[in-house]
Amino acid sequence: MLGAVRELVIANTFGTGHNLDDYRVAFGVPDLLFNLLLAGAISSAFIPVLSEYLAKNEPERARQIAGRVLNASVLILTVGAAVLFVVAPWYVSLIAFGYSPKDHELIVSLTRILLLQPIFLGAGGMVIGILTAYQRFFAQALAPLFYNGAIIVAAALFAPRYGVTALAVGVVVGAILHVGIQLPSLWRTGWRPAPALGLDDPGVRKVGRLMFPIALGLAAAQVNVFVDTILGTSLPHGRVAALRYADTIAQLPLGTFSQALAFVLFPFLARDAAVGAIDSIRHRTALALRLNIFVLVPASVGIAILGVPITAALFERGQFGQDSVRQTAYALTFFSLGLAGQAATALLVRVFYALQDVITPLRISLLVIAVNLGTNVILVQLLAQGGLALGTSIAATLNAILLARALRGRLGGLEGRAILRTARRALIGVVPMALVTAGVVYGITGGSLQGGLRPLVATLAAVALAAMTYLAIQLALRSEEVGVALSVIRRDRV
């Protein structure tokens, strides 16, 4: 949620202006390094291995492996950042060929500042992995608050005077706070700093063997990022920023529910896999898929209908005008189509990683990436930034379908009939919900793009009435997911 506040403050300061596009392009370089090495690869390979040792009641070995992998991760990120620092001008000229030399100069400068971010944020990500394996969630919940808080302060107080450079510095400060706030909890697990890398440690080597296919899949996925950035820079200025704002809104239901559910579930799946509890894995996975369908089908429809009032209510102020609202809401409509697919993919990939099967997701991701590249090149010509968003939605949905099919064979089923019943009830519920939402929005805003109080009132009223409508229908249908969702929110069951 604070991430949305961060984007709101940035939008108020910069709108979808010229320099913000330069910042977004520059951010892609350190983001590549972080996503490639830490966001998925090392942490996804590391948590199952650490959970395996904890399940075997070998806490000392677990702490030893954790420290060595953390050291190796920071070293890899530092070397990677140094290399990217040197090649930044070449990289920028490649991905931002549609921009002017002055833009290139600013992007390179921002890139070199932002390259400090993946070192600290990557270390913080590894600490999150360790704390997750130990099922300690409080400190890691605080970490993104400090990260986003530093960026918000930079955007609100310093960016009006120092521009996007202040924003880049705020990102680095936030990354330092991200890892710093977690160190006391890490210390309480028994971790102590030690210089060893443990490259001959069997546990560390196992993490490396699992990590390589994951990193390869992420590297292939970054090809999509390159292509999207290149295609985005061929569009008029502001479209890259509009795409990012739209993605931020679309990520709200994913970040607040689906990704949090998958993240919390991962260590439990890893421990189930370590003791061979396949029935438990099957049930947990099916239940999580049903909850995602129950929540994200109405969320997707609601976001598609509420695109304009949500965007206007959140962002239309300062430099963010009606054209920015229009361009962002346009992309948001297409992003909304892939929310269920993104949620299912995030969950199913973690199930494979918990089973220490990293090859199957790699094979599927390579196929999906090829499809996404082809669709994006075609769709951007037809739908501009909306085509890039639609390509992302198509890829996410295809990825989820292929992963589910493969996992079904691996687990001996996925409780498919229960999932289909949940989907049927969700579709029945969203039809009247959509009518209520559209009626409320049009009745209050009259289709206007104007910001202020009216779109906020329309959004809040529509969300409240739509939620009540959907919930009433689900209760009438005796939907089991209502009670399960409430128990998950209360953390009574996972």
Image (cartoon, rainbow, N blue to C red):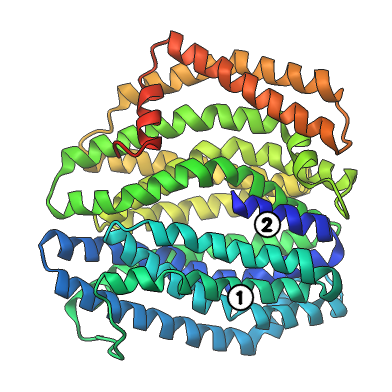
Identify the secondary structure beneath mark 1: helix
Side of 184 relative to 223 (left or right): left
417 shown above or below 307? above
What residue is at 75 percent from the left and 19 percent from the top? 440
Q: Amino acid at mark 2?
A: Arg
Q: Nearer the viewer, residue 378 or 405?
A: 405
Question: What residue did someone put label 2 on?
Answer: 6
Q: Mark number for residue 173?
A: 1
What is the x, y in percent for residue 241? 76, 57
Task: State the image quarter where residue 339 is shown.
Answer: top right
Side of 21 relative to 347 (left or right): right
42 shown above or below 407? below
Res 21 seen here:
no
Q: Residue furthest top?
A: 476
84 shown above or below 141? below
Q: Amino acid at mark 1?
A: Val
Q: Quadrant of the C terminus?
A: top left
406 shown above or below 478? below
What is the x, y in percent for residue 346? 43, 48
Identify the secondary structure beneath mark 2: helix
